[in-house]
Amino acid sequence: NRAGVKGLLRANKPGPCLTLFESACSDQRTAELMENVQLYTTAISAAAALGDHERALELVSRMNRAGVKPNKKTLTALMGACIAGKKYEAAANIFMKIKNPDSYAISVGLQALCLDGRFDAALELITEQRSGQKTLKGKQVMAGYNKLLEEGLHAGEYDIARDTLSGLLGAGYIPSKITFRAIMDGMGLVPDRPFTSAAMRKMSDSTPSDGKFEFLLFVLDSLEGRKLIVDSSFYSSILVLGAQAGGLHKRIASLLTRSRKSGKQKEISVCEEESPDEACSTPITSWEEFLQDYSSYKENLGPSTVFPTVRVSTKDFGRVLAAEQGVAYRGGGRVGSRR
């Protein structure tokens, strides 16, 4: 029975696993053998897989009554059950009680803290992992950063999201496609323009805040600071958001398209494009700063204005061109160049 309980869970059969466990517990011949921390932990993991946090809590109570002390893995399984049951506060509280958590417990704990909105605690935990207590492996740290980005943005905590992205880049990590997807999901961004009239009306009724667009420009500035490539879907979603907002946001989105270059394209200085008699203007070094101080910049905008480069992946290029079309101004001359 002991081997069978564990085997059923490994075979991804949590229901039969719990059934066998309970059957063995109720059988006088095997009941005493089942009073084992590993088997109880297996049963709690099965309850977590079924999303039944109440069953998991009941199993822990039974453990305590039987004199079986829950260990680190037991509490981690219980955390997973609470997360599955959307009892995020309970999951976070359980994590805070685990002494010297291992890498898996920290990974689940980070998820619990993010889902419960304890973003400062989550950021502190992941910062410790990259600077001192290196319990987590690189992929686990990245997964923690991605989760914190998604949940922080979903809650509108842009300062936390900024600190998270800065920490990720500062630790030497390169944002993956999963990272860009986490940002898009957290902010509710879409990479494609709506084509039905109903969808277009729905988008026009939802105007993005300045904080939302500023954060996206902050991401572009941060990536360009390390000469990193922007995911094509993420870039497209910024343009779609700019088209949706209109006004200054659309104007800046249009300028982004004129600063775009592929990762393999040779970078061109504006001074190389102009005659020797023309002097280069002072370059604009930050998209976010440009948005914030647009009123002071707009009078001096012209063909020699230098904007930050936006390096975009060449994947899904049709999507990129469709998004760029949505922010194009008909009959407008070229304003500015990339640097």
Image (cartoon, rainbow, N blue to C red):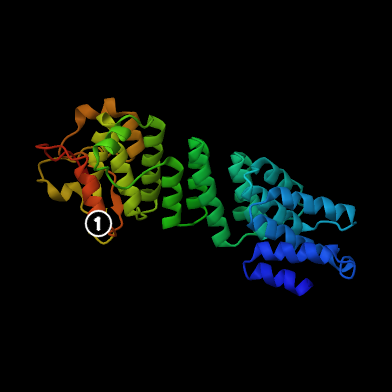
228 vs 300, nearest the viewer: 228
Residue at the image point whose x is 65% and y is 70% from the top: 10
> 338 and 243: which one is in front?
243
The image shows residue 46, relative to residue 338, as above or below, that is below
Is 207 rendered above or below residue 5? above
Q: Residue furthest toward the bottom?
A: 3
Res. 108 in view? yes
Where residue 246 appears, as percent x and y from the top left, is 26, 31
Q: Which of 176 and 23 is in front in this view?
A: 23
Q: Crowding at label 1, few (<14), some or many (≥20) Cα neighbours within 10 Å?
A: some
The type of residue carrying mark 1 is Phe
In the image, what residue occupies the spot 89% across and 56% down? Answer: 66
Quick one: quadrant of the N terminus? bottom right
In the rendered image, residue 304, in percent from the top left (x then y), is placed at 17, 40
Q: Position of residue 245 (x, y in %)?
A: 30, 32
Q: In this view, does 309 lie to the left or right of 34?
A: left
Asked whether the viewer can see residue 124, the reply is: no
At a point 89% along the width and 70% down the height, the residue shown is: 29
Compare residues 100 and 287 and report the one nearer the observer: 100
Question: In x, y percent, where is residue 163?
Answer: 51, 42
Residue 280 in the figure: left or right of residue 82 = left
How many numbered marks, from 0 up?
A: 1
Q: Name the residue under label 1.
A: 317
Secondary structure, mark 1, is: helix
Residue furthest out toward the top: 295
**In this picture, residue 81 sits left or right of residue 119:** right
